[in-house]
Image: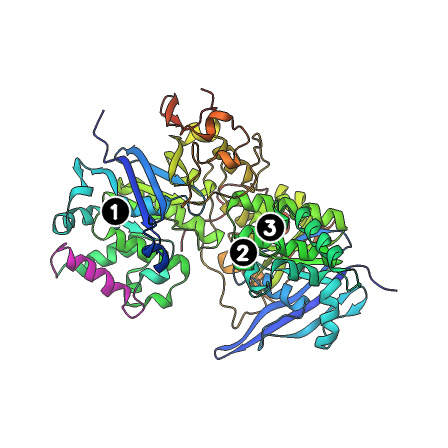
Amino acid sequence: MTEPGLVVDGLTVEIPTSRGVVRAVRGVTLSVAPGEAMALVGESGSGKSMTCRAIVGLLHPPARITAGAVRFQGRDLAGLSEPEFERIRGTGIAMVFQDPMSALNPVLTIERQVAEALPAASSPPRERRRQVVALLRQVGIADAERRLRAYPHQLSGGQRQRVMLAIVLARRPAVLLADEPTTALDVTIQAQILKELRRLQAQLAMSLVLVTHDLGVVRQTVQRVAVMYAGQVVELAPTAALFARPRHPYTAGLINSVPSVDRRAALAPIPGTPPDPVGLGDGCAFAPRCPIASAECLRGEIPLRAVADGHWSRCLKAHVVGGARVAGTAAQGS
Amino acid sequence: MPEPLLRVRNLAKSFPLPRSPLDAVRRCPCEAVHAVDGVSFDVARGRTLGLVGESGCGKSTLGRCLLRLYRPDAGEVWFDGVDLVRLEEPDLRPYRKRMQVVLQDPYSSLDPRQTVGSALLEVLGVHGIGSPADRPERVARLLTQVGLRPPDARKYPGEFSGGQRQRVSIARALAVGPELLVADEPVSALDVSIQAQILDLLLELRRSLGLTMIFISHDLRVVRYLSDDVAVMYLGKVVEHAPAPELFARPRHPYTLALLSAIPEVDEPVRPTVEILGEPSSAVHVPPGCRFHPRCPWKVERCLHEVPQLREVAPGHRVACHEARA
């Protein structure tokens, strides 16, 4: 039987460094159903981007997958050769990055780059141009005809991200991985691009994996969330359930760290800083910053356990983690 | 009413663009980026003004003009009754001590080859603060004040995390005992859990030291958390200025409304949504009339040629929009 969608199973990514081996991703297991939008959220160094890159086979050496599997429509991607991967990246799994400048070719026109993404049918040039214009219009580029001959550097950041989305639209991938696609953009442009992304995802019935550090973006864009900390998924839940009642103290701390314009509530920052990725032990990596940790949290691997329907937490004390925006989650400090 | 610590009037700053040799021969007029164009406001002692806007709106240039890191083209910056724009360098010196800055990137504003302790001692020495004998004691106090430990004085900037480095640059700004602190995107490069720590530190310092603050950020959520008053900037102009609770409860300018609508909130949004299309116009070829009109959902014919002036629509609430209702 073939599994639908994308399955990540026990994925582990290691990077050898002069200080020792960094385990950037530690046994991540996820599945994304066809047409589902989910987010990987976490702070810098949490392993969210690395997970994403490992899925599409774009890890920078010496980072490499040391355990686990990535299956797409039942096929294991981890063992594929580069040409085979190339084919899957075309129409199976596509990726957009924070900086579209790095993904677009600086010496080719927009028309050429979008046209290359169209299916390799032998339609006449005029027809292809018409298709490119239609695609650019669909992603909200108003003066599409005029933009055909433009080069990437002549466009703004928001426009470049729209061109990337037009290319995605042309390829019609089954899965789109978007790594911080709006982080470099101004907030009004971000709102436009997120709206475009949601529309595109619904229109193509495509699976979306959105990698972001912004909980607000998560809340407005996806149905399910995986929260990552120190290379592991620490909480996995439907979006509404996660915000209504986070069941991992790290998630609760993150939610309490975001200021809001509607409420001038006191923030409750998480004390301390994330752990050194070299030499992470078996116990809970969040324990040194956790307000409810005790000795047992440092003893051995803590499994991801179901706490409610579809809601998983890697915390021994998930039952005592309170609702969102509880005051006094943690004491202050550095 | 007491004299405000800072009084800014009609401040303007533009940066000429490089001219091609051909244009120079043809004597084409030199084009310029109009970064700040006719900005006026007051900041009372002990209050925090949040300057908010998107990239290129001129908020950082404005901050640098206030500090006299840039010389404004026109306008006045009255600091404690003295117009800084008219002062030259040796006379500015005493004022440099009274106003300090914290920047977004603590990596580039700290010397990697100097220990934090020696950097702080240097600042104290340059400004002649305390006697050489009691300066190490002051350094220890400063570090404690920003949530670091006195032994951290022996460390180099590279040994600190991003959040701790921002604490170091705050300590350096506080070393000279400033009255005004200009914080330019001080938390934008930090992860959200660390960002919250630094925001709370700034709040605490403001309370304990009675600092007056200009807090510059693109993030309305962060501005809301820290500011008493908020000025929203668009293409070099202040389009709305009000006490923070008033601005967030009753925003009047369509750009402010659009900014608020665009914030991805963690809580359920409860305000009306104004969506704007397109991108900001160029600060070189500024649109005539209201600068926001090409993106404005409310625009009428008048907006295309008549520049809206800031006018008071409620006590302390000023808006530059022809269509804004009182």
> Which residue was labeled with disc 3?
A146
Corner quadrant of residue A66: bottom right
The image shows residue B244 at horizontal and vertical percentages of 41, 32
Q: Secondary structure at mark 2?
A: loop
Residue A293: mark in rendering: 2
The image shows residue B80 at horizontal and vertical percentages of 18, 37
Compute the Cα span from label 2 to label 1.
Answer: 46 Å
Q: Are marks 3 and 1 in contact (CB under 8 Å)?
A: no
Compute the Cα span from label 3 to label 1.
Answer: 43 Å
Is B123 magenta? The answer is: yes
Closest to the camera, between mark 3 and mark 1, is 3
Name the subunit of mark 2.
Answer: A
Closest to the camera, between mark 2 and mark 3, is 3
Residue A276 visible (yes or no) = yes
The image shows residue B298 at horizontal and vertical percentages of 53, 28
Q: Secondary structure at mark 1?
A: loop
What is the three-letter code of the residue carrying label 1? Leu
What is the three-letter code of the residue carrying label 3? Arg
